[in-house]
Image (cartoon, grey):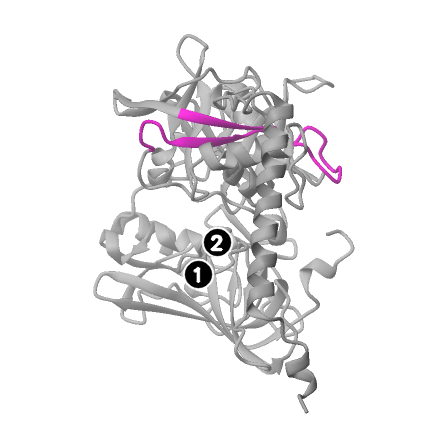
Amino acid sequence: MMDETNQRKVPPAVFVGGVLALVVCVVAAVAVFEANSGSAPQVATPTADASLPVSRNGAIAETVSVREQVAQTAQHQDIGLMAMAPMYTPAVVGVELFEADATEPMPTVTGFFTGPGRVVVPRSAVVGAVRGEVVLDIGRRFEVQRIVADLPQVDLVLLQVDLPSELMRGLQVAVLEPFPEETLLAMGQAAEPGAEDPGHPLSVLEVARVRVVEQVVRIEMASPLQGNSMGAPLLNDTGKLAGYVGKGAEGDPIVYGAERLLRLEALPGLSLAEWTGGKTVESTRPPPETEDLWAEIRALPRPEGFDAAPTEFRGFDVRPAKIELVDGGLRLDDRFTVTGSGTKADPYVLPWALMMSASETFNPARGKDVLPERVTMFEGEWVRFEGSLAIPFAERFVSELLLMQHPWDGCCLGVPPTPYDAIEVALAAPIEQRPQFGVLTGQLKVDPFVRGQWLYGMYLMENAGLSRPAEEREDN
């Protein structure tokens, strides 16, 4: 007697016959469809006007038929660029700027994040503004704090914006310029910030050629740019920033190569009002580090409880800090404000900008080997940071993690951390949850990990505790 399994097997002849019948039906259906349609669909070459709104969950609006989408995917691969847009559009923002005594903003311009709180905007759009706000596609607004870089030759200013770490998104800059005939994805600011589908205008453009004019990289496109594309970033097929739209000397839109951003140096900067009033960002460059300058700083009176500035820390020279007491905390080198008192109950709340400023004097790869006291002075103190968390997946209970200033998925999305904006954390007690963001309090350790001329790590935190994840707070 045959078992039940064998009774349910399909004879090979019947199976093959069924497959052949199915193939014949499909071929016949395609033939009938072709006859009724009259001709094969015409797939247009993408232009600046070929805009497909993309929602936050990646669904593409059906502005063309399914058959046209399939043909376009096969012939141009443009749907691939469009489909990846939702991963990067959170980094693209609108910037509202106001002139003095104005109640209505100037025309809103597109900007984009390239790093923690750093927004690139066309310089020509900022001229005359005394204040401004960055508008995220989720509808939240944040005040522009300062202009920290100014490059008129490529129509660019870099704005500093303070916002919660969980909202920070940054586009990674491509190292190489695009090639002719390569396609780029241009992304504009959200049409309806705060809506379920913010409606970022998207365009797939083809590169005609790349030129270098007076050390400025210009990318010429095969089709005209949209009139409202000023400030829009252009991404290549790997999601890297290849260029952005600025204004030329004659007022016409120009795509500038993004490689300049790799060498961009952010300075302490100016408020919009100071910049519009005639001051230059370059005037805020800190004075060169000299022994005379250090002697002047060491001679300054110190608040009660602070010893004289050390001359050495972990085998490296130390740049002394100017320390002043302010309401509720400290003011360091006339640049950074730190709140708290350094105890477990009232830890110092250190701004990420302070930690990153160590790169100004300590960067072994560039021959800089002086540690700033404004960082080393917090060795062993109780400190608090808020940021993005990278947690190992292989362990159920986690006792170590990486705290970063901004989100990074470990691969493609976000901006990879540097030794200056990441902290290796050892928790006082293991945790089981895996939040993406959080607030950590622990004892800071400044311990540069240098091999050869490369700095691999800078900060550690011990005896740390994780408070409620940042995404659970009501204001987020």
Residue 45 at least partly seen: yes
Give the quarter of the figure containing the N terminus: bottom right
The picture places residue 449, in percent across and down from the top left corner, at: 33, 69
- Answer with left or right where residue 206 lies relative to residue 366: right
Instruction: Look at 34% across and 64% down and name the residue there.
Output: 456
What residue is drawn where x is 33% and y is 39%? Answer: 263
Q: The residue under label 1 is which amino acid type?
A: Val
Q: Residues within 10 Å of mark 1 (few under 14, many from 20)?
A: many
Q: Is residue 307 above or below residue 256?
A: below
> 10 Å neighbourhood of mark 2: few (<14), some, or many (≥20)?
some
Compared to 363, does 28 lie above or below? above
The spot of residue 13 in percent (x, y) is 56, 65
Determine contact: label 2, label 1, CB under 8 Å.
yes
Say the numbered circle drawn on residue 375. 1
Q: Is residue 302 above or below residue 193?
A: below
Please tell me whether mark 2 sits on a helix, a strand or a loop. Answer: helix
Left or right: residue 3 versus residue 109 is right
Which element carries disc 1, helix, strand or loop? helix
Image mark for residue 354 = 2
The foreground one among 59 and 422 is 59
Q: Magenta segment: does it hold 187?
A: yes
Farthest residue, direction right: 474
Which residue is outermost to the bottom? 1
Task: Name the residue: 41% across, 55% down.
Answer: 321
The span shown in magenta is 178-206
x and y percent of residue 28 in the render? 60, 38
Magenta: main secondary structure equals loop
Amino acid, disc 2: Leu
Q: Residue at x 39, y 11 (%)?
A: 249
